[in-house]
Image (spheres, helix red, strand yellow):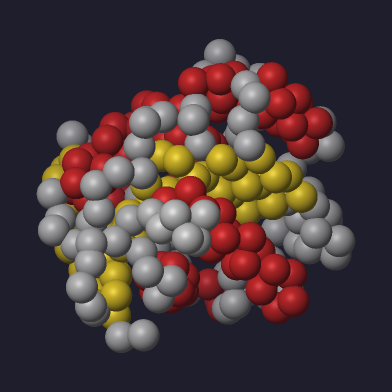
């Protein structure tokens, strides 16, 4: 499928947010997906993942969430301890409140695009953005109807604004995939998250693929696991399809 794609700037409360957009180069409109990046930041690998979503029949936006810091790029093949320190600093400069306001702006931008369909939207986040897709779904329950996170962190924390505490405000179907061998996710997170999803009476699927490491979905990263990544992509795109695409009575 041919795609229409572009690099755009989205006005937000905190400035202009550079973002990558992609959608099918054919008659729309298409349901919108917000792609929340991982800690290593905006890069071509993120754009490639947005393209894969777009090829399924979606309008996908992948914002550079570090835009407040200027243009931040990491040469990941050369990653060492010093680079990891800087990546963590960039990640930690984000806040729930700030990203929530950014999400408001991204949705406003999407609503103004002629290629974007009215109605439900979806979102997916990796790594640090597990918390942000959860917040997006609870902050915009009448728009976000499908939300997914891979090896998400910060979803369950010891704080008053822990994202899992507000799941009863969501109206989305959730998909959370955690690596079986992921030291960034404490053991207690998954049972607490499952309990919160169950109490909120939401549709959800939580998994820990056997042998998966943190980052297993990224094709250009060392932890990549092709078979598990393919399975993750299938679950993700099926989640979007059943919640965001209008189906005829014959298809239902």
- Between 42 and 26, the one lying in front of the other is 26
Residue 45, how many percent across, how many down?
46, 74
Quadrant occupied by the N terminus: bottom left
- Between 52 and 224, the one lying in front of the other is 52
- Left or right: residue 44 versus residue 212 is left
Residue 50, how many percent across, how many down?
41, 68
Q: Residue at x 73, y 44 (%)?
A: 206
Residue 127, how many percent across, how many down?
58, 51
Q: Residue at x 66, y 73 (%)?
A: 230
Q: As drawn, which residue projects farthest toward the bottom?
A: 2
Residue 233 quadrant:
bottom right
Residue 117, how many percent across, how many down?
25, 54
Q: Residue at x 70, y 68 (%)?
A: 231
Q: As drawn, which residue projects farthest toward the top?
A: 160
Up-down relation of residue 90 to residue 41 (above or below)? above
Up-down relation of residue 195 to residue 17 (above or below)? above
- Looking at the image, can residue 84 be seen? no
- Between 222 and 24, the one lying in front of the other is 24
Up-down relation of residue 67 to residue 166 (above or below)? below
- Looking at the image, can residue 10 be seen? yes
Q: How many marks?
A: 0
Q: Residue at x 64, y 24 (%)?
A: 201
Residue 32 quadrant:
bottom left
Q: As drawn, which residue projects farthest toward the front?
A: 250
- Left or right: residue 76 versus residue 21 is right
- Left or right: residue 86 versus residue 176 is left
């Amino acid at each position: 499928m041919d795609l229409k794609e572009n690099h755009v700037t989205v006005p937000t409360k905190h400035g202009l947010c550079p973002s990558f957009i992609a959608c099918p180069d054919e008659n729309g409109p298409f349901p919108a997906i917000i792609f929340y990046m991982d800690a290593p930041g905006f890069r071509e690998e993120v754009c490639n993942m947005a393209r894969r979503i777009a090829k399924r029949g979606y309008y996908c936006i992948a914002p550079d969430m570090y835009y407040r810091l200027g243009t931040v790029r990491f040469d990941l093949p050369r990653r060492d301890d010093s680079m990891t320190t800087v990546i963590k600093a960039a990640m930690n400069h984000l806040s729930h409140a700030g990203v929530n306001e950014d999400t408001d702006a991204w949705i406003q931008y999407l609503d103004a695009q002629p290629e974007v369909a009215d109605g439900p939207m979806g979102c997916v986040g990796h790594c640090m953005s597990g918390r942000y897709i959860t917040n997006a779904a609870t902050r915009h329950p009448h728009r976000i109807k499908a939300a997914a996170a891979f090896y998400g962190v910060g979803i369950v924390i010891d704080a008053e604004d822990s994202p899992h505490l507000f799941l009863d405000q969501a109206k989305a179907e959730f998909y959370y995939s955690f690596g079986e061998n992921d030291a960034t996710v404490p053991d207690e997170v998954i049972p607490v998250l499952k309990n919160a999803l169950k109490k909120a009476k939401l549709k959800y699927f939580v998994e820990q693929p056997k042998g998966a490491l943190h980052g297993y979905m990224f094709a250009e990263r060392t932890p990549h696991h092709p078979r598990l990544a393919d399975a993750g992509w299938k679950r993700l795109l099926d989640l979007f399809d059943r919640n965001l695409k209008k189906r005829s009575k014959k298809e239902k």
